Every structure is written in structure tokens, then in C-alpha cells.
Amino acid sequence: MPMPQHVVRGDGHLNIDGNFTIALEGYKDARLASARKRFLNTLSRETGIPYHHEVTSGQAILTVRTAGVDDAVLKLGENESYHLEVTSSHALLTAPNPLGAMHGLQTFLQLVTITPEGFSAPAVTIDDEPRFPWRGLMIDAGRHFQPMDVIERNLNGMEAVKLNVFHWHLSEDQGFRAESKIYPLLTGKGSNGLYYTQAQMREVVEYARDRGIRVVPEFDMPCHTTAWFVGYPALASGKGPYKIETQWGVFDPAMDPTRESTFEFIDKFIGEMTRIFPDAYFHVGGDECDGKEWDANPRIKAFMRTHGMKDNAALQSYFTARVQKLVAAHHRIMEGWDEVLQPNTPTDVLIQSWRGPKSLAAAARQGNRGILSTGYYVDLNQSAAEHYLADPLAGDGASLTPEEKKRVLGGEPAMWSEFTTPEIIDSRIWPRTAAIAERLWSAQDVRDVNSMYARLSVVSDKLESYGLKHQSFTRPMLQRMSGQADPKYLAVLAGVVQPPVGYQREELKKYDWYSPLNHLVDAVPPESEMARKFKNLVGVIVAGNASTEQIQKAKKWLTLWRDNDAKLEPSLKRSDITAELTPVSETLSQVSTIGLSALDDLESHRVADSATTQSGMQTLKSAEKPQAVLRDMVVAPVEMLVQAAHAQKP
């Protein structure tokens, strides 16, 4: 994952044992040497076998033959292709440049699996290259700061699934996270002491480049800028005073587009940041300006009248055009969210669409290149399947001309951080982002959801070898909230609940920057693997295609969930953190009891009477509502069982 473009299976397999070796041929540089070392370290973690052998060309089990160099600064559209041939005796990886070679090494790592004879890779011939050149991941470090180890291990994960752009969201109302030596009060007063030094940002750029990943910084303007104004209030359109925002949402503060001093400040700031971030693209945000500060400022309103600006959209368009010229003057290409697209927007401006394929297609028709993030907001807790089936060229994009389709460069999962901390952020990004990576790399007709989930499970396990903590984070959190070394009954409950989808969490409970994210809703992944498997099993049962073993498995799970409440309930009173789970546990038991009854009716070919069905469905409909900000994912499959039991013929 991603599925390669062309795969031909061979006969046999290549043993991966203590004699495995790798050698570099052709072009060599420090990046390839580093990639070789990472490859062996990852392979060792996955197999438990140490690899220390140094071999010369012609003697290695795996030979990596690289034809030539790539640019010192990674660029959009570089050749990322590779050819990998694995036989029962050796493997050969060829690529035109180090970037393709690194991608091929990740493919080889994914091929390695345990077999009855030990670890091996299947004999196979692969020719591969990406469908889209821009395959990114955005991490918001503005709302909740994410330290260096979080950034670096997620870059490791990006390399594993061939994502190639790290979009680093560095400023927000809740904090300014990038050190400026020209304007030290940006972090001095606007960060709560949580920011990246210039040395650290350069380290991330180099760390990413070493893994074939470009780094695009984002500094949102003219809105989402409260933290700028704490140290530099003259930038703002309002009177102030300003303080770092601790609430979530869209806020009024906005830069003053009528003052030349605003653009002088931005010009110097961009110049400083482009010396740290060498990528050709520079993201200026541009989203969600409500214009209220502009409306309340008589001087700004007078400026708008003088310049014939009929509304705030026109004022923002003026601001964006000025900023675009500043970005271009520093030899960078401006990137922004949907709102920066106006009829007169220069066609080299890149549009990142959060509004959807229609907006993305509109940008392409206007001559602008763009990327899709709608459908890839991994913070909204949608399923991997939903993300997987969202395509940059679906909807309005399908009707674009071939030339217009070339302007759709790819997409980016977006990890907004209102409900993430360093402890849990990996689980919100991974493994679902691997499914998005496949959508952006593989052929458009690779859309088999069942195949995706089967492979995603394997890739998820492998990603832990890259230092990610998306699987391992839950148990320590359950231990902490329960006070138990083995919170096995709490783990049963945790296995079948999920956080709310979309923006429902904000509607169910009030949160702000100070809210502790240490409850069960924070300790469970966005998608319950157990509940998904149960739903699939129920689908087989209600279709009448289940074996006796499958029916018994469903009974076993339902019995486990029904009886868990009695075992868990006494320990929930230990703290408020777990006491809120009492109704959640009770509901799971009730739902499972209904499910067992319906399953018994189906197995006995006994039609459930209408009164029993109606009563059960009422209970289940009530159970659909979140409790303790959690969704019971057993409810929907049990509803399927109840409906099937009532609909069957005696």
C-alpha cells in the first residue's frame, strides 16, 4: 500500500534471513546511504534479525541501481518511478534517481512477511510510478503544539506510504509556532513558549528531504492571526488588546490590509521564512475571514469606498494580490485555501480545496493548479473507506478536459489539532492516511474496499516499526484512567466505541485549549476494527450465507459484550473519567442482549413478533445517540439482525 501500477507475480520467494545484504550501484550520495541504513534498521525491527553485513556490488542479495542525481531541493513533478524485480535468489531495484530508489525500498519492506519457512518476500516484478505528483499530509501545530519527535515519526510514516509533501501549519489564533529573529515577539508573546526554533525547522526540512519529502510551511493570513497581534497589535484591524485565543472556532481578528506597514512586515517575514524553507511553494492560508473587524473600522470602510471595493471579499482579494506579489518577489509560488481564488488570481497560485471537488474543478477551469483536502480531513473521524473512495477527479473533476485534469495535482489529508495531543495524534492520522496515500498514488480504478482493509491491517502493523504509536497508545491511556495494570474489561468496551464523526464532538461538549484530552473518547481510534468486522459478519448472516462457525463467532462476541458490563461496572466508580462510562457500558450490554435474541430467532427460523421488534428498535434508536461523547458501533449491526429476524419467513 499504495498498490503499484503494474505487478506480475513470479514463482517462489526470496528468503530474508541473517545472510540478507544490500548494496548500492550507480549513482551514490549521502541520501541513498541514509536510506539504505533506515531500510536495514526497519527490516531488523520487523524481523528481529540484525543486519550488519557490508558487501560490495555484485555480491548483495538486494542491489539498488540508481541512474542519476535529483535536485538538491526537491521539486514538484520529479520522476518518482522505480522497477523492482524479486526472484528466489536475489532482488534488483532500479530507479532513475534517489527518490525512486527510496520508494522502491519501501515497497520491498512491505513485501516481507512471515512464512512457514521464516521471513521472505514473494517473487514479483513491479513497475511503479505515482498517479499524482502532490501527495501530502498537513499537520496543524498551531492549535495544539506538536513536538519534534511527533513531527519526525510522522515523516517516517509518510515515507513508508510514499507521501511526498509535509504541509506544516505553523500559525493559528491559538499560537504562533515558528521562531522569527526579525520579529521575536511572534513567539515571545504569541506562543505560550511552545514553538520551533529556526534550527529545529531546518532540521525538519533536512529530515524530510532525506526521506523524499518536501516541506511547505503555512502562515495563515489575513485571518486566523490573533497570535500575531499579541506581540504586534499594529498589524490588526481592531483596537485590541489581543491575547492568545484559548477557544476553538472562527474568530474576528484580521490583519489590516489598508496599511503599507502591514505589507512591509509580511515582506520581511516571508523573506526570513524562505531562507529556512527552500521549497518552491509558500502557503498563506487565506481561509475563513468573517470581516467583522473590517466592518467595525471606519478607516478601513473609507479605504474600501475610495478604492471601489464593494464588499469584504473584494478587500481580501486586494490583500491576497498584494501578498502574492510579495511571495513571488521572494521566488516562491503562493499556495492558499479556496478563498484566495478570485477571477484575477494569477494562474501559478496553487489552490488547496477544503470546499470540495466543485471548487477544485473551478480552479482548474480558471487555469490554476490545485489539490484536494475535502474528504481527507482525518481529524473528523470518518472511516478509512470514506477517505479511500474520495477522489481528486471525482464529481465535477470527472468532467474536466484532459488539459484541465493535469492541473489537479493530488491531495492532502488534513490533521487539524483541536482534539489531538502528542499522545494521541498518531492514531488520528494512521493508519487511515495510508488508504489516502493509495488513492493519490495508485490507479483510479483501484477501489476494492475489502482489499484495502485487508492490506491496511498489515500496513498498520508495519507502521509501528517506523516509530508511530497509533496502535500502542490506547493501553497506557486505559491503564491511567482505570488505575489498573490490566484494564481488560475497559478494553472490551473501548474496542467497540468510536469518537463522533464530523463536528459533532464540539456540539456534544464544550472544549477549549485547556480541556484535558484523557477520556475514553481520546483513547480509542477513529474507527473500531472489531466493530467493522462484526458488521461485516452480520452482513453475511442476514444475507443467509453464514456458516455455523460464523454464527457461533457472532454469538461469542455478543455474549462477551453483554456480560462485560457486570465485570466493568464496579471499577468505573473510581473516578469521574471512568464514571461517565457507566451508561455506555450498560447500553452495550442491552444492545448485545437484543442482538443475541435476534440471532437466536434467525438461527431458529422464528419470526420475531412485532411488539418485540418495535421495543428492540426503540432501544436501539436511543442507543444510536452518543454517550460520554462516544458512539456505540455495535448498534447498527444489531439493528440489521433485528430487522432481518422480523422480515424472515417462518
Image (cartoon, rainbow, N blue to C red):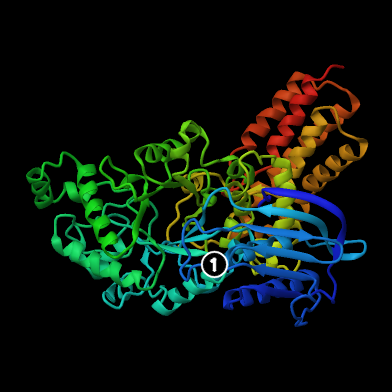
Q: Position of residue 473 (x, y in %)?
A: 65, 64
- Residue 174 x/y as whole percent: 37, 62
Along the line of sight, which residue is nearer the eye, 30 or 382? 30
Q: Is 454 displayed left or right of 164 in the figure?
A: right
The residue lying at 58 percent from left, 78 percent from top is 30
User: Label 1 amino acid?
Assistant: Pro
Q: Is residue 433 left or right of residue 486?
A: left
Whether residue 475 appears in this view of the structure is no
- Label 1 crowd (10 A; few <14 / some 14-19 / many >=20): some
Residue at left 76%, top 38%? 536
Q: Nearer the viewer, residue 326 or 9?
A: 9
Query: How many numbered dots are placed on residues in this image?
Result: 1
From this viewpoint, which residue is outermost toward the top? 649
Looking at the picture, does residue 400 appear above or below residue 313?
above
Q: Secondary structure at mark 1?
A: loop
As drawn, 310 above or below 8: above
Q: Residue at x 19, y 40 (%)?
A: 311
- The spot of residue 427 in percent (x, y) is 61, 58
Query: In the rendered view, does 179 fall on the left or right side of 649?
Result: left
Between 287 and 523, which is closer to the camera in this rendering? 287
Q: Give the quarter of the figure containing the C terminus.
A: top right
Residue drawn at point x = 85 percent, y = 44 percent? 556
User: x%, y% of residue 459?
Assistant: 71, 57
| Residue 45 shows in this picture | yes
Q: From what the image shows, is residue 101 above or below residue 438?
A: below
Q: Which residue is mark 1?
A: 422
